[in-house]
Image (cartoon, rainbow, N blue to C red):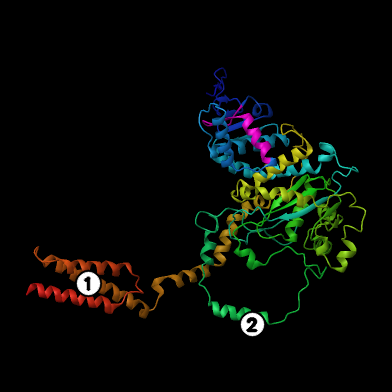
Amino acid sequence: VVHYLQCDHSNNHKKNVNGPIRIYPNYIQEKNIRNYTSLSIQHGLYIYLGGDYACERELVERYTSDLVSTPHSWQKQADSLNNLAFSTARSQATPFNMRRFSQLVFTYKIIEMDLCLGSTNVATPKDIDEFDLWAWSEYPRLLSRFIYLWSNHRTLIGACNIPGDKCSACFTIDGHQKARRRVCRSKQVNFKSSDFSEPLVIGCWRTPIRNSLYCELHQNDEKLTKAPRTNQKHTHAMKLRNSRQWQRQKNIFFGATNCSTTKARSESYINKCSRSFGLLAMVTNCRVIISFSEIFRSETLREIIQLLINTIRISDNALPKIACYDDGCHLVRFVQRHVGKLITDTPASNTLKNTKFYIDKAHWKNHVGTWCKENMSPYATSDLNMINTQSAEQLFSWLKRYAPIISSLGWLKAPLYLLVLFHYKNLWTCKVRPTRHFDIANMVPDSATISLPNAANTLRTTSAVSSSNSDGYLSQAATTKHDPSSHTVNENKWAQMSKEIQFNNRSSSENFISNTTSNVDNKWATIIHAVDSTQQQKSKRDRSPNIINKWATQAEQLAKRQKH
């Protein structure tokens, strides 16, 4: 039983348009909005967020504590709690339901994280079905505060207990390709970022609809891809002939180095992928996650630069001036040559240009270029003494255990699940309780491109419509080619003949059956029906007019014999 207080404003002479106010144990509801505060969300031994379902606070906190160290799916956790209640003879109003438990924990942890990141009041929709969309729309704000807090954790929380006072002395950026969720196959979704002079191709981030490879906004793209298959023998011959043609190897990014460490994949490979390419993460040497972003196409230099510029801008220049990246040689030369050209000349891009990059020690053996050995070696500098350059790899070793959970999430919950998971991981690393409040709401700079999917969300419909209109002739050609009405007369005459023969066969058999008397053996009628039903199940290509005419002739002869 849930008790609440209701105020109808009976002593107020003015008409209240918002209706009554209801005060529940963990929130205050006014019209269609629920307001949460730090005191209300932590009130009581039970957590009630609306509806007819509540849960003990101890169980939610236990699941959160276990989640940081050991990944558990929602179903396994619900089964475990039901088994615990049965084994210890605890009373349950109803057994744990996986969907309700996951929705309650997910909602509660997002609200708790929002309050921890500086909000004094969190207003959410009353309808629980609208919460996921509301949370996704608030994701850029939450991510910006996450980046600001953990980029400045040395000053806001305190230095980590690392020998040599090396807290936040260096950060490592790398890509993780284990957690790959299903995404739409439309890869040509562009976004015009203010940090680049040319549009940035990010790909669609939405989850495909059921029985399709495309989301609801790009169903026209699925029709365009249904092209007829080419002759495999001809294709194999073309590949063999092209492989024999020698071509000069093109220099990657103006021939910066000859290290074969680039991460970008080919367009043919990208267009065939129905899953994302994981995520990019920035981790300090004290193993604190300061920023991340999902990858929907491949790990390109432009997406890495966009993440770095966004993080520099939001962190308020608190980012370390020393960094490690396993493909740092190509990244450094690309930034040095393109700031002011392809990369917009801004204070954040100049800060990135002045950041000293090295190759991390785990990937140094893969670099063989002369320029790379002279400028990127982690062993030829004292800047990396007593510095953990493998912090990103250590994070991914922990994160890969969550790959089955992340890979099964949709486009609304996946980024928020990662944000909550990384936030509680950092809290555990820095020994900070999740109930602590950081007053940073007014300190975080704005960044419109902190989340590329959210930034491109306003342009997604226009991109889908323009893409379908520009390639409309392909859709029409593909439909015409697969339309049976476009076949020639010679191809259709056999189908028409088969229909006529089948109809005549059915008519003759029906006339024969109606004319036979009750004392006549109907075995021939049974045979005719069996043959007729067999012929109906066959395809038009397998039907033979000669075989059908044979049985029709026998039926006519049998009918004449019965008359005589």
User: Is residue 60 magenta-colored?
Assistant: yes
State the residue lying farthest toward the front. Answer: 87
Left or right placement of residue 29 versus residue 141 in this view = left
Q: Going from the N terminus, do you reach mark 1 or mark 2 first? A: 2
Is there any visible trace of residue 520 in the rendered image?
A: yes
Q: Look at the image and say whether residue 384 sits in the magenta stretch.
A: no
Nearest to the observer: residue 438 or residue 286: 286
Q: Looking at the image, which is closer to me, 223 or 3?
A: 3
Give the quarter of the image for residue 67. top right
Residue farthest toward the top in the current orientation of the protein: 11
Q: Is residue 400 above or below residue 487?
A: above
Q: Where 48 sits versus 258, above or below? A: above
Per the rendering, the mark at residue 241 is: 2
Residue at position x 11%, y 75% from top? 560
Of 473 and 489, which appears nearest the observer? 489
Where is mark 1, residue-wise?
505
Q: Disc 1 and disc 2: Cα gap in Å?
A: 55 Å
For the magenta stretch, what is the residue range? 46-67
Q: Identify the amino acid type marked 2.
A: Arg
> In what element is the residue under mark 2?
helix
Residue 329 seen in the current view: no
Amino acid identity at mark 1: Asn
Residue 508 figure quarter: bottom left
Q: Residue 46: x percent and y percent?
A: 60, 27
